[in-house]
Image (cartoon, rainbow, N blue to C red):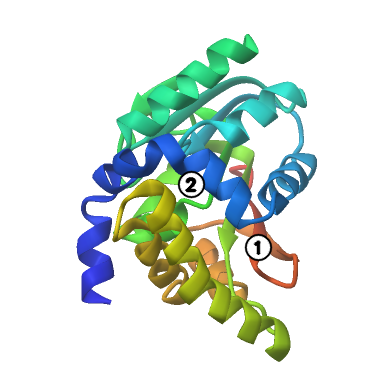
C-alpha cells in the first residue's frame, strides 16, 4: 500500500510516460469492451449543458459525451499533460471542442456549482485522497446535477475472479511492459485496482461527502462498475 500511495503522488508523470500507447493498450487489454462500458455510462446520463470530465486523459469519454449529444460543452482536467495533448489532437481531428486543463482533482480551480454534470472514467482510484476528490466533485456540481463514475472492480463469481486475477496480475503487466516499455505503470494498474474499494464500499464514500440517490451497476461480471449519484437541490 505504501508503494501505491507514493506512485499516486506522481500519477501525472506515470501517465505521461505511457500516453503514446495508452489508447491502443486499453482497447487491446480489455478486448475492446472498454468502449462498451463508456457507451453504457453515457447512455445512463441526462443531457447537460456544461460537463466536467475529471481525469479526462486522452478524451475518450469527453468525445463520446459530445458525439451522443449528452453535453454541449466539456471541460476536462488531468495531471498528465501528455495524455491531454493526445486528447486535444483527437478532438481536433473529430471536429469537437474540449477545454483541457492541467488541474488536481483534489483542488479544482472552479467556483462552487460550476457544472451541470461531472464524469470520471477510471480515474478515482488514482486520487491520493479519495474523499477529498469526491468532495471537490460535489462542490463544483450544481444542485440537481448528476455524477457518473466508471471504475474497475473485482468479479464476485469465483471462476471469473480466478481468471481475472491471473490475467490482471500476469498477462496485463507483461503486455503493458512489452508495448509501453514501462516497468511500473501496468504493475501499478494491477495493484491500484486490488487495493481500491468498489460496489457498496464505494457508495459509502459518495454518501459521506454528501451525494444522494447513489447506486451502482456491475459491468462484465463486475470487472468494471458504473456508479451514479446526485447532488440534491438546496432547500
**SS category of the residue bearing label 1:** strand
Q: Quadrant of residue 192?
A: bottom left
In the rendered image, residue 232, in percent from the top left (x then y), is placed at: 63, 48
- Alpha carbon separation for disc pair 2 and 1: 20 Å
* Residue at figure coordinates x 56%, y 58% from the top left: 151
Between marks 2 and 1 in the image, the one whose residue lies nearer the viewer: 1
Neighbor class of circle 1 (other Cα within 10 Å; few <14, some 14-19, many 20+) is: many
Looking at the rendered image, the quarter that the N terminus falls into is: bottom left
Q: Is residue 40 left or right of residue 136?
A: right
Q: Secondary structure at mark 2?
A: helix
**Residue closer to the observer: 206 or 57:** 57
Q: Is residue 23 above or below residue 208?
A: above
Residue at 70%, 49% in the rendered image: 32
Indicate the quadrant containing the C terminus: top left, top right, bottom left or bottom right.
Answer: top right
Where is mark 1, residue-wise? 225
- Identify the disc placed on residue 138: 2
* Direction bottom: furthest residue: 158
Image-quadrant location for residue 152: bottom right
Q: Is residue 213 visible?
A: no
Say if 46 sits above or below 220 in the image: above
Q: Residue at 31%, 30% (x, y): give it.
A: 81
Q: Residue furthest front?
A: 178
Amino acid at each position: 500500500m505504501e508503494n501505491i500511495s507514493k506512485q499516486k503522488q506522481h500519477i501525472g508523470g506515470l501517465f505521461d510516460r505511457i500516453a503514446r500507447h495508452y489508447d491502443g493498450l486499453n482497447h487491446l487489454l480489455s478486448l475492446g469492451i472498454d468502449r462498451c462500458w463508456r457507451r453504457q455510462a453515457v447512455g445512463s446520463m441526462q443531457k447537460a449543458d456544461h460537463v466536467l470530465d475529471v481525469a479526462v486523459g486522452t478524451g475518450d469519454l469527453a468525445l463520446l459525451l459530445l458525439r451522443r449529444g449528452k453535453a454541449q460543452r466539456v471541460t476536462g482536467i488531468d495531471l498528465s499533460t501528455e495524455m491531454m495533448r493526445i486528447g486535444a489532437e483527437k478532438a481536433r481531428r473529430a471536429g469537437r471542442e474540449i477545454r483541457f486543463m492541467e488541474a488536481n482533482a483534489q483542488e479544482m480551480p472552479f467556483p462552487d456549482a460550476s457544472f451541470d454534470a461531472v464524469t470520471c472514467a477510471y480515474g478515482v482510484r488514482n486520487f491520493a485522497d479519495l474523499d477529498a476528490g469526491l468532495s471537490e466533485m460535489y462542490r463544483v456540481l450544481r444542485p440537481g446535477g448528476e455524477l457518473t463514475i466508471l471504475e474497475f472492480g473485482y468479479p464476485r463469481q469465483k471462476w471469473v475472479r480466478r481468471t481475472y486475477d491471473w490475467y490482471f496480475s500476469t498477462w496485463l503487466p507483461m503486455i503493458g511492459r512489452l508495448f509501453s516499455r514501462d516497468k511500473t505503470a501496468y504493475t501499478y494498474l494491477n495493484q491500484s485496482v486490488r487495493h481500491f474499494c468498489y460496489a457498496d464500499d464505494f457508495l459509502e464514500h459518495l454518501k459521506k461527502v454528501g451525494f444522494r440517490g447513489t447506486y451502482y451497476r456491475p459491468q462484465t461480471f463486475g470487472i468494471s462498475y458504473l456508479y451514479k449519484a446526485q447532488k440534491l437541490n438546496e432547500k
